[in-house]
Amino acid sequence: MSRVAAIIPAFNEERTIGDVVGTVKRCRVVDDVIVVSDGSRDATVDAALRHGARVIELHENLGKGGAIAAGLGATDAQVILLLDGDLVGLSAHHIEDLLRPVLSGAADICVGQIKRDFIQMLFPNFSGQRALRRRVLEEIPNLHNTGFGIEAVLSRHVKRAGLRTCTVPLRHLTHVPKEEKHGFLRGYVGKLKATWQIAKWSGRNHRAKA
Ligand SMILES: Nc1nc2c(ncn2[C@@H]2O[C@H](COP(=O)(O)OP(=O)(O)OP(=O)(O)O)[C@@H](O)[C@H]2O)c(=O)[nH]1
Ligand SMILES: [Mg+2]
């Protein structure tokens, strides 16, 4: 039984997924590295496999929440590390810093902060880099269709349920913005869609599963 599993949702991340997987694989604290290719049309699956990840290939694009739900269904690990597939500069220290508070029992969820950008000013605690207890994700109804709203939903749930949370800075870590990955127009349309999904799920009054 794995104790800690990393779930990395990836939509066309062939440029960066190999380095991200390689870094996590070298971290002995992580037992299982799962890349969920969310309908990628590039070489994401090959790159992830080449670097030793277990890969779930979704042939249809389900959105970020759907990809994470698929990853969760493929592991019984009690602690989950969520990482984006487009990170640049990820190190073992980042991973250990994220996992330490959850593994020690000091927190139920630990959120990694990359840098304060526009989205983070609008939505504090918005970050794809998190360590959390498995049950926190299991308590989220509709996890599979939250898309980019997943972080907003998680933050609300954590507040409402009074879970113990902490944040850690992830220095020198960056990511590739959508407009660079998917081209200018598709990138900006993607950003608008993501902002809409976050806003929609931020305002939604849902109940967590008992
Ligand atoms: N764009 C996009 N990303 C997805 C999707 N499903 C999973 N992902 C992954 O979710 C993670 C976060 O997506 P990004 O597009 O990097 O989003 P972001 O970093 O929050 O936003 P930007 O600052 O606009 O780049 C990445 O690992 C993506 O590959 C999807 O349907 N669309
Ligand atoms: Mg990104």
Image (cartoon, grey):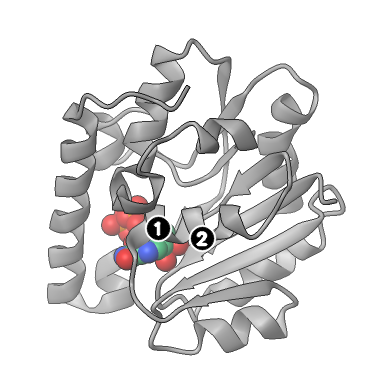
Q: Is residue 128 left or right of residue 49?
A: left
| Pointer 2 local density, CA inside 10 Å: few below 14, some 14–19, many at least 20 | many
Mark 1 lies within 8 Å of ligand 1 (Cβ measured)? yes
* Mark drawn on residue 66: 1
From the top left corner, tell me how far across and down residue 123 is, in percent. Answer: 27, 31
Q: Residue at x 72, y 39 (%)?
A: 78
Residue 146 can be seen in this image: yes
Amino acid type of the residue that numbered disc 2 sits on in the rendered structure: Ala
From the top left corner, tell me how far across and down residue 125 is, in percent. Answer: 40, 30
Q: Residue at x 17, y 74 (%)?
A: 186
Relative to 194, say whether 60 is above or below: below
From the top left corner, tell me how far across and down residue 161 is, in percent. Answer: 46, 14
Asked whether the residues under the numbered discs 1 and 2 touch, taking CB atoms below 8 Å apart as contact, a structural biologist would say: yes
Q: Is residue 188 left or right of residue 80?
A: left
Q: Residue at x 72, y 49 (%)?
A: 76
Amino acid type of the residue that numbered disc 1 sits on in the rendered structure: Gly
Q: Residue at x 75, y 40 (%)?
A: 96
Q: Is residue 188 left or right of residue 63?
A: left
Q: Is residue 8 left or right of residue 196?
A: right
Figure disc tally: 2
| Pointer 1 local density, CA inside 10 Å: few below 14, some 14–19, many at least 20 | many
Relative to 190, say whether 171 is above or below: above
Q: Quadrant of residue 165?
A: top right
Marks 1 and 2, how far apart in space?
A: 6 Å
Q: Which residue is mark 2?
A: 70
In the displayed image of the protein, which residue is found farthest to the front?
210
